[in-house]
Amino acid sequence: MIAKPHILGLPLLHFISLITFLIAVISIWVHMEIRLAEINVEIINLKQDLFLHKSDNRKDLDLIRSDIKSDNKEILRKIDEIQIYILNKK
């Protein structure tokens, strides 16, 4: 009868299978941690872009509001002039 080699009380093939399984689990865990770190960096970058665009949009909106306000004042002034002209003509 041939004696089968044992490592840590396991047959050689079982030991190799166990080591391979552990290496695969560790590899997957490391890959997931790296991917999570990449996703966190992307989220941080997206938040920074959001705040940047939000402030840019606020500035643009304020500019548009001031333009509309000045345009409305000009229109109202012209309407007043027309009313004054019509009233004075009578």
Image (cartoon, grey):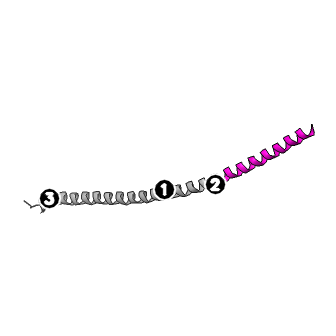
Name the disc covering residue 60, or none: 2
- Left or right, 56 with respect to 80, comes to left
Three-letter code for the amino acid on which mark 1 is drawn: Lys
Q: Position of residue 81 (x, y in %)?
A: 84, 45
**Residue at which label 3 appears:** 11
Which residue is rendered at x = 31% and y = 57% of the image?
A: 29
**Residue at which label 1 appears:** 47
Q: Position of residue 63 (x, y in %)?
A: 66, 54
Above or below, 80 relative to 28: above
Residue nearer the viewer, 55 or 71 = 71
* The magenta segment: 63-90
Q: Is residue 30 magenta?
A: no
Which residue is rendered at x = 50% and y = 58% of the image?
A: 48
Q: Which tag, 3 or 1, sits closer to the chain's start?
A: 3
| Secondary-structure class at tag 2 | helix
Which residue is rendered at x = 90% and y = 40% of the image?
A: 88
Q: Quadrant of the C terminus?
A: top right
Residue nearer the viewer, 72 or 81 = 81
